[in-house]
Amino acid sequence: EIVLTQSPGTLSLSPGERVTLSCRASQSVSSSFLAWYQQKPGQAPRLLIYAASSRATGIPDRFSGSGSGTDFTLTISRLEPEDFAVYYCQQYGSSQGYTFGQGTKLEIK
Amino acid sequence: QVQLVQSGAEVKKPGASVKISCKASGYTFTAYYMHWLRQAPGQGLEWMGIFYPSGGSPRYAQKFQGRVTMTRDTSTSTVYMELGGLRSEDTAVYYCARERDSTLYFDYWGQGTLVTVSS
């Protein structure tokens, strides 16, 4: 079973800063199977990135994804106030189905 | 526009069952897979299973096999998820989410349904 580990657990940053979130898989994951979501309090998750690096419809270009194998990253080039949220990576494995990392919380410094 | 509208919050006693609905609109219902996921309070996301509105057997996560049933009503473009044998650990927000044709990610989500299991 593939386990996704996100780091750090919490990040305290200021608007305007650049941030890179990490998602590490316990085994190699196909890039086609890796997605990122943003979740704000009381809301459903929102798809940001699919296939490791493709932005979903309507997602600003300050969000970018990259990586391959076991290491994937989500970068926000300049944090906007509305970007402070929890971010999850997600992968698909044929044996266990769809699994998520434990999340990284971005909070305002 | 695509919408997934879920039924309202539920309070259930341990051992009971809950059935949640997810009504789809704004797209061809049978052209997309539907998933159910849940999120316990303050916790991460957990996948429960996938349902194929066009037909075919649903696939349930091993953890929920024997307790979960997913069904549909094509006439109303609604998918249902029933979870039985409820225990306190099943207290969570339950989400339906759409997947387009084996793309392996969820592009639209319902608003969530809070299920509280308490004696």
Image: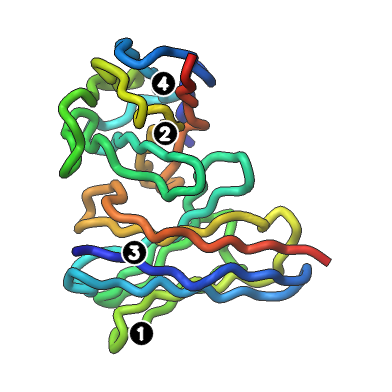
How far across and down, in percent of the image, does residue B83 sit? 59, 69
**Please, what is the three-letter code of the amino acid marked with disc 4?**
Arg
User: What residue appears at the point 22 percent right and 49 percent down from the top-left corner?
Assistant: B103
* Eye-nearest disc, 4 or 1: 1
Callout 3 amino acid? Met
Quadrant into which the C terminus of chain B falls: bottom right
Element type at marker 4? strand
* In this picture, residue B6 sits left or right of residue A67: right
| In front: label 4 or label 2 | 2
Q: Which mark is residue B64?
A: none
Front-lying residue, A67 or A97: A67
Which of pointers 4 and 2 lies earlier in the amino acid sequence? 4
Crowd class of label 2 (few under 14; some 14 to 19; many from 20; radius 10 Å): many
Which residue was labeled with disc 1?
B73
Q: Chain of mark 4?
A: A
Judged from the image, the secondary structure of the residue bearing numbered disc 3 is strand
Q: How many marks?
A: 4
Whole-angstrom CA distance, mark 4 to mark 1, is: 39 Å
Q: Residue at x 40, y 45 (%)?
A: A45
Label 2 sits on residue: A88
Judge from the rendering whether residue B82 lies leftward or rightward of residue A94; answer left or right.
right
- Quadrant position of the N terminus of chain B in the picture: bottom left
Q: Quarter-wise, where is residue B55 in the image?
A: bottom left
* Residue A24, label in figure: 4
Q: Amino acid at mark 1?
A: Asp
Q: CA distance from mark 1 to mark 2?
A: 31 Å
What crowding class fits label 1: few (fewer than 14 Cα within 10 Å), some (14-19), or many (20 or more)?
A: few
Q: Is residue A60 left or right of residue B99?
A: left
What amino acid type is highlighted by mark number 2?
Answer: Tyr
Question: Residue at left 34%, top 14%?
Answer: A19
Percent coordinates x, y for residue B107 in the rendering = 27, 51
